[in-house]
Amino acid sequence: MARSSTDLPRMQNQSRARAPLERSLNIVSQVFEKAVKPKKPPTPRMMRQYDLIERVKRYNPNTSEAMLNRAYVYAMKAHGEQRRASGDPYFSHPLEVAGILTDLKLDDATIAAALLHDTIEDTTATRAEIDQMFGHDIGALVEGLTKLKKLDLVTKEAKQAENLRKLLLAIADDVRVLLVKLADRLHNRIAEETLDIYAPLAGRMGMHEMREELEDLAFHELKLDAYKVVSERLTALAKRNRDLISEIEQQLARKLADRGIAAEVSGRQKRPYSIWRKMERKSVGFEQLSDIIGFRIVVDRVEETYRALGVVHTTWPVVPGRFKDYVSTPKQNDYRSIHTTVIGPSQQRVELQIRTRDMHEIAEYGIAAHALYKDGLGSPTEMLSRESSAYAWLRRTIELLAEGSNPEEFLEHTKLELFHDQVFCFTPKGKLIALPRRANAIDFAYAVHTDVGNMAVGCKINGKIAPLVSELANGDEVEIITSRAQTAPPAAWESLVTTGKARAAIRRATRAAVRNQYAGLGRRIVERLCQRAKIVYSDEKLQGALPRLARSSIEEVMSSVGRGEMSAADVVRAMYPDYKEERAAAIAQQPKPESGWFGLKKAKSVKVKVPGEPGAAIPIRGINTDLPVRFAPNGGAVPGDRIVGILTPGEGVTIYPIQSSALKDFEDVPERWLDLRWDVEERTPQRFPARLVLQTVNEPGSLAQVAQVIAEHDGNIDNISMERSSPDFTSVTIDLEVFDLKHLNSIIAQLRAKDVVANAERVNA
């Protein structure tokens, strides 16, 4: 079957020997040398067309030379005389990115996209031109790598996050966008962003070689002094341990050969950034690190990994707690290997990784090592999602993160998802759930399913009841106890969870719950207005009026009414254009136009339903309701009070007793007044806020007598403050909770009967 220019090469049929990535990083290494050498070395020769094509033809003889030549010439002309900060021609950068990708043996479309990846962003080239000359496939890759130019965002973090969101969504469509971007980061040196985002992303995709390169390059830029110190120590240690490494390699190879195991044994020191990070995490010095040397045993078959492990463990003592089997339980990024640590020659701790050649390929090159092109149905991206759990994880994560409400949250959640090491837990049915370290049962619940997390009320860990905030350990079996009565998680959970998925889901559910509260309030307001106006309300009628209200859904309309951003009268007028709000009749019925509570000139036009009176007022059951209501500050209201609601945009309804002097502030906005009535169930009484001001005799025990009266009459003191009003008297302000007006009046009467209380009055909100 002839291979098209956009096909990815069949990697499993190629030689597994790969040229090391370091060969493609010569320019980067030389740039680093410039930073420490007083004299600038000569600029390296830029790769020519035939050099690039020759590198591609080594692994893909059927490459489209004409297309690669067109991409080379087009990019070179587009960048023209542009220069990098180093003074080199700008075109040298996309050329080196393409060179790095040839070491990963990628297809023609990816190499061409690497050559063109900065043309739309930094030159006059357009997506239409790219599509016309190179096809939609390459055009989509280049577009996915192009940063957003016109961003109306205030902060640098917001701009960074929006660009990252665009990039990740493009990666979800085509994984090759990620490969080009990582190669771009490998050659570019935007260190902080690389260390925060792109190096962990490479690790998550299983591309450990590239991750280590990115980390060391960023480490060199961000902490040059630390980089130099660690590198010098490693160099000195390498000289001392040269014979030791060789000795261990020979011993291991000989002992494995004696058991009939053909294996490649290689030893190396850890990288500078890895060493520095361990020193920081454990707060130890370089000399205190005992596992700087690592060895790798590569065998042919899976069963030989366990045989090799037996040879190692019977040769040297094992360090307890350092054995990990990622062969039987692979990491989420497809990494498979056996890890162990032993006490080797000279009492030196030695870390070992045992894996097969295929495992080694995946461990070093990650998704780039997968055979992306297969005969059959489906796009390379779809087939990679089925074959690579790392890429499947990335697409799931991107889908969740893309629902974030603002750029900063997206950036925060992305970093949370990328940075963590993992623990492996199990559901009662044996399903494996991978979580970051320090994750708790709430994180586990959301990893199982968002609905399970939202309805979680408890958990069992290894069969025992445990708090949801319990930190999980490797091997825990976790059962989540759910309740359909809980439809939204507590907002406080957001600060308790570890994973970005759980945090995003909790934030989304909390917002949805608040939105539903406002929508519920808005619906009640609109329905009662229709009832008063003797108009039939229906969702179908409102659906047809949505264009006139400039809203996309009925839920959005009701939420706007509940928030006070839209009046109920406007909604009714949109459904019935002939509707007119009638307030004149209510005014005409008043014999004295100037009368009203506390002289409110327009209060007479607002109908307030008293308890027990039938009508269309909105029922209020207290602050633990499904409506976004709150009581007026400095006094509140209790059942038995005549009440009115004031709708505040963005906040909901504030309840005032009708005698409150604060209502004067709203006399000019009658459209914000709501008819309210109490709807309290006697079987499940609730407490409501009230405030008292007492004048007490200044003598020992007076406050104790006041508290005793309130306690004996089943009142609950919420807050108390005292102020000396004269040498003989103290003013005491008490915020308390009572069941109703009768209950409150009973407490006031008992307080007034006390000799130590000169006066007791209720404060109106």
Image: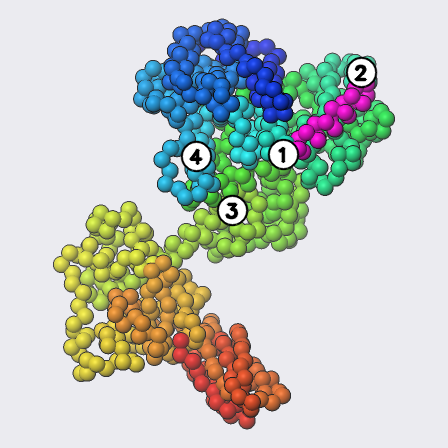
Q: Nearer the viewer, mark 4 or mark 1?
A: 1
Secondary structure beneath dot 1 equals loop
Q: Which contiguous range is marked in magenta? A: 225-246
Q: Nearer the viewer, mark 4 or mark 2?
A: 4
Q: Dot 1: within a 10 Å radius of its alpha carbon, few (fewer than 14), some, or many (20 or more) residues?
A: few
Residue beneath the point at 54% across and 39% down: 415
Q: Overall secondary structure of the magenta stretch? A: helix
Sooner in the amino-acid sequence: mark 2 or mark 1: 1
- Residue that numbered label 1 is attached to: 223
Contact, CB < 8 Å: mark 2 with mark 1?
no
Tell whether 249 sits left or right of 195. right
Tell me the amino acid under the disc marked 1.
Lys
Q: Dot 3: within a 10 Å radius of its alpha carbon, few (fewer than 14), some, or many (20 or more) residues?
A: many
Residue beneath the point at 63% across and 34% down: 223
- Residue that numbered label 4 is attached to: 163
Contact, CB < 8 Å: mark 3 with mark 1?
no
Measure how far apart labels 3 and 1 are at the Cα level.
Answer: 32 Å
The stretch drawn in magenta includes residue 238: yes
Residue 316: in sight, yes or no? no
Measure how far apart labels 2 and 1 are at the Cα level.
Answer: 37 Å
Tell me the amino acid under the disc marked 2.
Gln
**At which x and y percent is residue 39?**
61, 20
Tell me the amino acid under the disc marked 4.
Asn
Sooner in the amino-acid sequence: mark 4 or mark 1: 4
- Residue that numbered label 3 is attached to: 503
Q: Nearer the viewer, mark 4 or mark 3?
A: 4
Q: Nearer the viewer, mark 2 or mark 1?
A: 1
Question: Residue 765 or 326: which is nearer the viewer?
Answer: 765
- Residue that numbered label 2 is attached to: 250
Q: Quadrant of the N terminus?
A: top left
